[in-house]
Image (cartoon, rainbow, N blue to C red):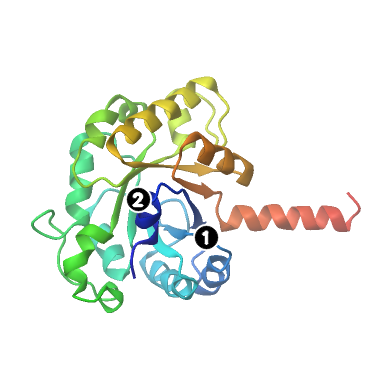
Amino acid sequence: MPNKVKDAWKAGKAVVNGWLAIPNAFSAEMYSQCGWDSVTVDMQHGVQDYLSCVACFQGIQPSGALPMVRVPWNEPGIIGKVLDAGAYGVICPMVNTAEEARALVQYCKYPPQGTRSNGPIRAGVYGEAGGYQKTANDNILVIPMIETKTAIENIEAILDVPGIDAIYVGPSDLSFSYGLEPKLDVEDPFVLGIYDKLLKETGKRGIAAGLHNGSPAYAHRMIGMGFKLVTISNEVGLMVNAAKAAVKTARGG
């Protein structure tokens, strides 16, 4: 299928991304039917492994939401496997330098642009007409996470690496790295100033900026600020918050 997130960005639109921590195809299937543009399987801080990632992709597929993965680290083995499983986007944590960004691009792309090994065991079945290998390099999103002081200091060099489609800001780790409270919906003027800088630098280069958010209202506000990909918590957070509200209402609270 075409990469609907990439198409939305080309049209200047923002996308709303779901986030899966639970390693279960049924919950992924139900959650993915809620209108998300894309849904990301979290292999870093979720309780997902490779087989559960594949199962979640199978659950996501009927919804038409674009399947993506946050990999646990910038490492070619797992990046190649999630792409072979059918990921249309790779979000990679803790990319702090241009060298690390170049490595990420290499791991995500087939030769001659990269060093990804050929063997799309599941992805190949669902590739576009003409052959998966012919379209994968253009179709797959390469998204380094920007979440440290070091990454901010190197941001221009990171963004100038060919093959980077977007960045994804991790607010908690970013705040942590500056000695601030780690949290999602940041109101600290210093961090918001960093967001402004990131939006300015990505905008210059036609690169999308993404952000993890704790609440729908904050995500909506960040779209207005210029972010082109916003995630709202994860399915665990949304479920727990809804359950707490239901119990409170039932008890007359």
Identify residue type, mark 2: Lys
Name the quarter where the N terminus is drawn.
Answer: bottom left
- Where is residue 20? Give x, y as percent: 50, 59
For residue 226, side relative to residue 121 (left or right) = right
Residue 129 in view of the camera = yes
What separation in Å lies between label 1 and label 2 (alpha carbons)? 18 Å
Rendered residue at 28%/59% (across/down): 140
Residue to which mark 1 is pinned: 36
Give the left or right position of residue 212, taking residue 144 as reference. Answer: right
Local crowd size for mark 1, using a 10 Å CA cut-off: few (<14), some (14–19), many (≥20) = some
Using the image as rendered, state which of residue 30 and residue 172 is in the foreground: 30
Lower sequence index among marks 1 and 2: 2
The mark total stands at: 2
- Is 10 rendered above or below residue 182? below
Quick check: can you spot residue 184?
no
Q: What x and y, as percent, mark residue 99?
A: 18, 37
Q: Nearer the viewer, mark 1 or mark 2?
A: 2
Q: What residue type is labelled 1?
A: Trp
Q: Residue at x 38, y 58 (%)?
A: 69
Task: Give the SS element for disc 1.
Answer: loop
Q: Where is residue 154 in the image (x, y as percent from the top left)?
A: 27, 28
> To which residue does mark 2 refer?
10
